[in-house]
Every structure is written in C-alpha cells, then in structure tokens.
Image (cartoon, grey):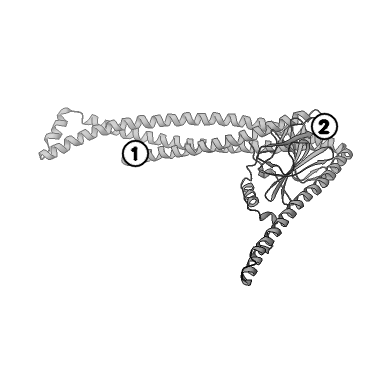
C-alpha cells in the first residue's frame, strides 16, 4: 500500500512539473508569435500605401521579402506549438493510462478487503478474535489491528475517489489539448495560404521590376552616387574628430613632458615613453569617450529605433533583384508619412549637420561609434550640440513615390560600416 501511495505521489509531482514546463513553453511561443504578428502588422501598414502604385520599386519588393521572412517565422512558431501540443497529448495519454491502472489496482485492493470483511462480519467472530488472545497485551494489539483495518478501508475509499478525480481531470485536460491542436492546425493552414498568396504577389512584383530594368538601373545608380557622396562626408567628419583627438593627445603629452622637466633623466625618459606611446585609437584617449563607447556597446540590441513605426525597406548589405545588385551601406527605413520625427538612438555629440542635395544629414558621435541620419527634410540640432537618446534631431524626407516618408540610418565604428539592425530593439 505504501508503495502504491508513493507511486501516486510521484505521479502527481511529475504531472505538476510537466504542466509548469508546458505553461512556460506556451507563454514563450505565444509572446514570440505576438511579436511576429505585430511586426507583420507594421509592415502591412506601410505596404498598403505603396500597394496600389503603378510603379514598382526596390522598397516595395523588400517589404514583401520581409513579410515573407516573417510569415515563414510565424509558420515555424506554429509548427513548434503543434509539436508542443503533440508531446502534451502523448504525455497526457500515457498519464491517463497510468492513472487508470492505479485506479483499477485500488479498486481491486478494496474489493479484496470488502470480501475479507464480509467473510468476518459476525460480531461473535470479532469478539471471539479479541477474547482468544493469549494475554491482555495481545488483546489490545488485536483491537488496534481491527481499528487500523477499518481506517485502512476508509483510506482506500479516499484514494479511489482521489484517483478517479485525477483521471477525470486529466481526461478533460486531454480534450482541451486536442481542441487547442485543432484550432492551431486551422491557423497553420490559414498562414500557409497567406504565405502562398504573398509569394505570388512577390513574383508579380519581380516580374514588373524586370520590365522596368532600365529605370530601376537608373534608380540604383543614383543611390550608389548618393551613397558615395555621403560616405565622403562621413569619412571627413570622422577624420576631423580623430585629428582633433590626436592634437589634444599631443598637447597633453607635451604638457606632461614640460611638467617633468625638473625630474631626473631616467624619470623623464620613462614618463615621456608612457605619454608618447601610440594609442590603438586616438578616440580611446578621452576617459569620457571611452565610457560612452563602452556604454554604447553594452546597449547592442537595446537601442531605440530612430523613427516610430519604421520599417526597413532596403536592408544593410547586398541584395539582388533579377540581375541587378544593391549594396546598401546602411538601412533604408520607411515611415507612414514624410516629416516624421527622427530621434537620436543614444547620447552623444552632433559632429555634422550638412546638406546633401535638397536633403539634410546629421552625424552624431558616441565615443568611437558614429550614427548617421540622412535623407532628412530638416534638422533641428547644430554642430557641437550634446543630445540625449530619444531627442528629436530632424524630420524624415519624402520617398521616391511620394507615398510616405523615408530616411537612411548608418552605424559606423570609426570609418567602418556596421549593420545597424542587430543593434536596434524591436518594441
């Protein structure tokens, strides 16, 4: 009996642990699915603005490609949920079978005790059992035994009732899991149909883009020219910052040598060696810059977006449309409308505010890192100004089709282009 009770207890504890893990897995998958659906909704909001335009564009194609990627992730999330449900249904079925065996065992044990009690139901036999004891102590032990036997039967009944309730609860849980699985499978089919529709829509856009290859080539060529001009501006601004840091370092080293003039030759030599040693980067010399740089790096994946409700229309790096290739040194972000606020993603100092044709460029320094905000219709900061994360620094310009706003966001580690996407958080 004790062994059976231990088995029942272990079964209850095991079920509780499995249920707790299942609840965690379900919550994690639901949050992931909600995040994906929120991003799809944001993208759809922007895509609806360009969907009806006759002219196809790289921006339109990239929105569709991003939608396809998210749709694939959503279906993958649903598949994980189906696996979770299949595992739970399997474990629930095993547990139901196990509990049914437990219940049958308890019933069989109770039946044997009932038969025994019936066979010895006579009060005369009970009294005879007591008075046939060899001593008073033996008689008391027999009374105790009979009392324990009655308690044992009561406990058997309680165990049967409890096991039956657990079995019924588990069966209800199984029915709920099976119903949930049917709902998830239905959602899976809907999302697969949506994916197929999106693929057909993307193929249609690609087909039209092929027919517009000449105009598209001109658009890409214009972007390359603009990127080259902006890169020259960025490099000049960064060189200017490095030169300023170098001159300050040299001035500090000269001041240190002059202050050591009265010391011994060996001391002066040692001090001079330490102060004139070439640094890894002149932007590493200022303690404030070093602290800001470290803080910036610690916020990788946590930086806010430079615009609200922004969607990446052209990703960082190389992408291909038919035979045409685009190598984007930044990310191009669409906004629902032109004139949307553009914000600094981190604390820093404005190093450049300049014109690039009929659009504005703002460069902000964060230690060794620089963020660049281009294609702005206006700027609301000036060179040398200290800015905080989230502070508005300008407004987005209009996109090529006039259907919304857009901006380009660069991230530089000194003069090296870095993909900004992993640095930005999804909210």
The front one of 31 and 109 is 31
Q: Residue at x 25, y 32 (%)?
A: 151
Residue pointed to by mark 2? 401
Labelled disc at residue 5: 1
User: Reading the chain from its start, which is encountered first: label 2 or label 1?
Assistant: 1
Q: Secondary structure at mark 1?
A: helix
**166 to the left or right of 334:** left
Q: Residues within 10 Å of mark 2 (few under 14, many from 20)?
A: some
The front one of 303 and 123 is 303
Q: Residue at x 13, y 33 (%)?
A: 128
The front one of 229 and 208 is 229
Expressed as whole percent of the image width and height from the top left, the position of residue 25 reads: 54, 38
In which image quadrant can residue 257 be found?
A: bottom right
Q: Is residue 92 visible?
A: yes
Q: Relative to 53, does residue 254 appear above or below in the rendering?
A: below
Q: How many labels sit on residues?
A: 2
Q: Relative to 420, does residue 81 appear above or below in the rendering?
A: above
**CB atoms of marks 2 and 1 within 8 Å:** no
The front one of 37 and 291 is 291
Labelled disc at residue 140: none
Q: Residue at x 67, y 37 (%)?
A: 391
In the image, farthest residue toward the bottom: 265
User: In what quadrant of the picture does the C terminus appear?
Assistant: top right
Q: Secondary structure at mark 2?
A: loop
Expressed as whole percent of the image width and height from the top left, the position of residue 166 reads: 41, 31
**314 to the left or right of 152:** right
**85 to the left or right of 390:** left
Residue at mark 2 to residue at mark 1: CA–CA distance = 74 Å
Q: Residue at x 66, y 30 (%)?
A: 190
**45 to the left or right of 78:** right
Foreground disc of the pair 2, 1: 2
In which image quadrant can residue 119 be found?
A: top left
């Amino acid at each position: 009996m004790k062994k059976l009770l231990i088995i029942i207890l272990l079964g209850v504890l095991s079920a509780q642990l499995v249920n707790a893990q299942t609840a965690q897995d379900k919550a994690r998958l639901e949050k992931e699915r909600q995040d994906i659906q929120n991003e799809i909704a944001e993208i759809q909001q922007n895509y609806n603005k360009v969907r009806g335009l006759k002219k196809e564009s790289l921006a339109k194609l990239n929105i569709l490609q991003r939608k396809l990627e998210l749709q694939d992730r959503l279906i993958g999330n649903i598949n994980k949920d189906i696996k979770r449900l299949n595992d739970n249904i399997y474990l629930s079925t095993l547990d139901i079978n196990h509990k049914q065996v437990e219940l049958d065992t308890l019933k069989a044990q109770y039946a044997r005790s009932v038969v025994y009690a019936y066979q010895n139901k006579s009060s005369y036999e009970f009294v005879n059992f007591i008075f046939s004891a060899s001593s008073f102590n033996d008689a008391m032990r027999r009374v105790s035994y009979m009392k324990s036997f009655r308690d044992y039967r009561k406990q058997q009944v309680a165990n049967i009732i409890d096991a039956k309730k657990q079995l019924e609860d588990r069966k209800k849980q199984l029915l709920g899991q099976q119903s949930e699985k049917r709902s998830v499978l239905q959602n899976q089919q809907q999302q697969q149909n949506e994916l197929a529709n999106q693929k057909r829509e993307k193929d249609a856009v690609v087909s039209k883009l092929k027919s517009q290859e000449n105009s598209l080539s001109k658009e890409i060529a214009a972007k390359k020219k603009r990127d080259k001009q902006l890169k020259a501006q960025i490099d000049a601004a960064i060189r200017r910052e490095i030169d300023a840091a170098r001159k300050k370092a040299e001035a500090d080293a000269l001041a240190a040598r002059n202050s050591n003039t009265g010391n011994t030759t060996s001391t002066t030599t040692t001090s001079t060696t330490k102060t004139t040693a070439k640094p890894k980067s002149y932007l590493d010399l200022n303690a404030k810059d070093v602290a800001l740089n470290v803080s910036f790096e610690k916020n990788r994946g946590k930086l806010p977006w430079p615009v609200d409700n922004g969607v990446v229309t052209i990703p960082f790096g190389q992408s291909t449309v038919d035979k045409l290739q685009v190598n984007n040194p930044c990310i191009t972000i669409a906004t629902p409308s032109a004139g949307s606020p553009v914000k600094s993603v981190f604390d820093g100092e404005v190093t450049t505010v300049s014109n690039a044709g009929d659009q504005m460029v703002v460069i902000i320094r964060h230690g060794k890192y620089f963020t660049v905000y281009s294609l702005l219709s206006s700027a609301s900061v000036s060179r040398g100004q200290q800015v905080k994360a989230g502070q508005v620094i300008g407004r987005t310009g209009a996109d090529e089709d006039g259907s919304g706003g857009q901006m380009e966001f660069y991230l530089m580690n000194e003069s090296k282009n870095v993909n900004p996407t992993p640095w930005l958080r999804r909210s």
